[in-house]
Every structure is written in C-alpha cells, then in structure tokens.
Image: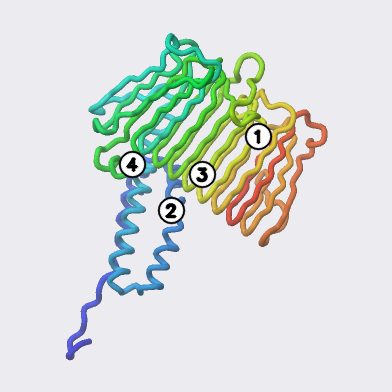
Amino acid sequence: MRDGKQTPKRRDLAGPIVLICLGAALLLSTTGVVPWAAWASVWRFWPVLLILWGIGAVFGRGSAVGRIAAPVLLALILLFAISSIASQSWWGWGRWAERGEGAQGDLPYAKTLTVSSAQFSPSQVRLNVDVGAGRVFIGTQSGGDILTAMAGYSRASRAPRLDASMSGSVLNVDYSTGREGFMPFIFFGRPDEHTLTLGRRDTPTQLDLEVGGGQLDAVLAGLAVTGVSIEVGGGTVKMGFPEATAGRPMAGGDWGARTLRFQIGAGTAEIVEIGNTGVQRVSGSIGSGTAYLDFSGTRLAGAVTGDIKVGAGKLELHIPTDVGVRIDSNVGVGSLRVNGRQHGRRGLGVDETWESANYSQASVRLDLRVEAGAGSIEVTHGR
C-alpha cells in the first residue's frame, strides 16, 4: 500500500503460459494428431523445472527478471517440445517405413545427388551423414549406384551437400543438411526431407552419423556394416538391421573390430537387431537422453564386450535368450533393473554384477561395464 492506496498485484504469468501450452499439446493428442506415446519427448525437458526454481530463488518470484524470464523460458521449451512430438507423429518412423522413401511432396525445392558405381569401384565405403534440423531416411537396395540422395527443402540456402573422394581403395562419402534449430520448422510448417539409398549392400560400409536437432531413420537390410558411430544432440535416431549380410561377417573398419559407438546428449537412439551386424564391441555415453539397444540377430559370435556411461538418462538393453550376459555396474543414485525387478542395493557408488544363468555355457557372451550417475539401466533377457 502506498499513500493510502493499495498497490495492484502483479500477475505471475508462468502458470497461465504453462496451462495454455499444455492445453494445446493435449488437444493435439485427444484429436489424434499426436499419439499419447509421444509425450515421452516432453519428459526430456524436466531440468527446466530446476532452472525456473533457480530463477525464483535468486531474483524472487515477484521480481521483474522472474516475471519475464520464467514465462519466456517456459514458452520456448514447451514450444520446442510440442514441435518435437508433433514432428515425430506427422513424419515419424511409421510413415517412413510405410513409404519406404522420403517423399518430398510440396516442398518448394528438390534435388537428386548421386555417387555413381560407374565412377567409383571401392573395396570399402565410409559414409558420413550430418543431420542438422531436417528428416533423413537411409535405406538399402540390391544393385544400383553406391549412393542416391533425394532431397526436398524449404529454401535454396538449405540445399544439401554431397562430396565423394577416394583414399586408396576406400571411398569417403559426406552428406550434410542444414543446421538451423527448430525455429524454421515452426515458420515453414514442415522439416526438410532427405532420402539416401545405398545400392551396394555387399560393399563393407562404415557409418558415421551426426544428428543435431533433426531425426534420422535407417533401415539397413543386408548392409555389410564394419562399424557404426552415432552422435545425437537433441534429435532422434531410429536404426534397424532387419536382414543379416549374406556370406561371412565382414572384417572391422577403421576402428579394428566391428564396433557400435554412440554419444547421446538429450536426444534418443533406438537401435534394433544389432546382432545381424556381427558387432564385437559396444561403446557409448548418455547424458539426459535415452538409448535402446536390441541385440537380436544371427551374426553374434564369441565374446562381445562394451562399456557405457549413463548420466541422468536411461539405458535399455534387450538381449536374446541364447546369449549369456554379464553386467558389471557402478550405480550412483540411479537403478539397475533386470526383467522388471530391481537388482542389488540402492545407494551412492554401489558396485553390482548381474550374470545370466546361461552365461558360463553360452557360445555367445555379452560382457558390459556400465556406469550410471542419476540414470537408470533396464535389462530384458530372453523376453
């Protein structure tokens, strides 16, 4: 109260903005535009609550900074989350698999790029794909050019780049898309689309994939993979190897053994039927994101080893019945669950080892060393 007059209360806009944004997202789900399962994407942004609490603690809820910063931050994060789950629904994995290609539709610009089999005859291919903010699908076919890329994009400045060069008998292929975050998706209504087709499935191929805020889907049936490296920022990778390579498993690439490497920030990676690649080594790290690894397949042999670090994220492992498993874990405040049950003690810095009943007799053994801070490890064996 000032001079006998009551000072009007200043409204806190954070609550109403949250309700409006959540209401819009719920409307998309209830009308069928976005599936309810896509809400898992929103949960990735839970650290924002800590940021908002910190702003309120430092400046006070009623301060000018608190009144402005909190609503703006909430609006941006929720807008990004809505954009993310909407893009996963409208142009997601199911639609890529259904079409078998990335139809460019009514995007104003289109381009086709080719690495010709008539021009190059390599003994090995190393493919580097850099996904900025667009959508990329990678598939395989029998026969044809080494690589065919079809792109649809919203502006001429976002045209993709394709470079190919020989280094001895190895063909290095680099394909890159634009990097402009999530705002172009909001302004232009739909992301750029890129379809890459590998036509030489029997040529040993090493994949280096980098995904910023975009999404990469890959169905690599029958590809002779020598190694896979995946780096995910806030985007999504879904990769499958539904068909094993004909003949004997291929030798390793630049990394020696056939290796799967991944580095995940706040994004998500789902890799299925890894066993069809004949992988020998798994190495990775997870920040606040999620990794799902399915070791099904027919090419696993001997000893498969690996080490994985989990910060505040989640690691899910699916391992076939005939594979013996040993998990050596160091868990901070996180958890280790095996077939739906908590394993070992809870507490800071707890070392636990879980070994499947068939480990000593199995012809294929998976030995993993996992370190988890505040994250969780879930193992499903034979289900």
SS label for mark 3: strand
Query: From the viewer's perspective, is 134 left or right of 260?
Result: left
Q: CA distance from mark 2 to mark 4?
A: 24 Å
User: What's the residue at 59%, 45% (across, down)?
Assistant: 315
4 or 1: tag closer to the N-terminus: 4
- Of labels 3 and 4, earlier in sequence is 4
Q: 36 or 169, which is in the foreground?
A: 169
In the rendering, at what x and y percent does residue 42 appear?
42, 49
At label 2, the amino acid type is Phe
Q: Which residue in the structure is indicated by mark 4?
A: 31
How packed is label 4: few (under 14 Cα within 10 Å), some, or many (20 or more)? few
Mark linked to residue 264: 3
Front in this rendered view, residue 244 or 78: 244
Q: Looking at this rendering, what residue extends furthest in the front direction?
A: 168
Quadrant containing the N terminus in the rendered view: bottom left
Do callouts 3 and 2 mark residues in contact (Cβ within 8 Å)?
A: no
Nearer to us: label 2 or label 1: 1
Q: Secondary structure at mark 4?
A: loop
Amino acid at dot 1? Arg
Q: Is residue 53 left or right of residue 10?
A: right
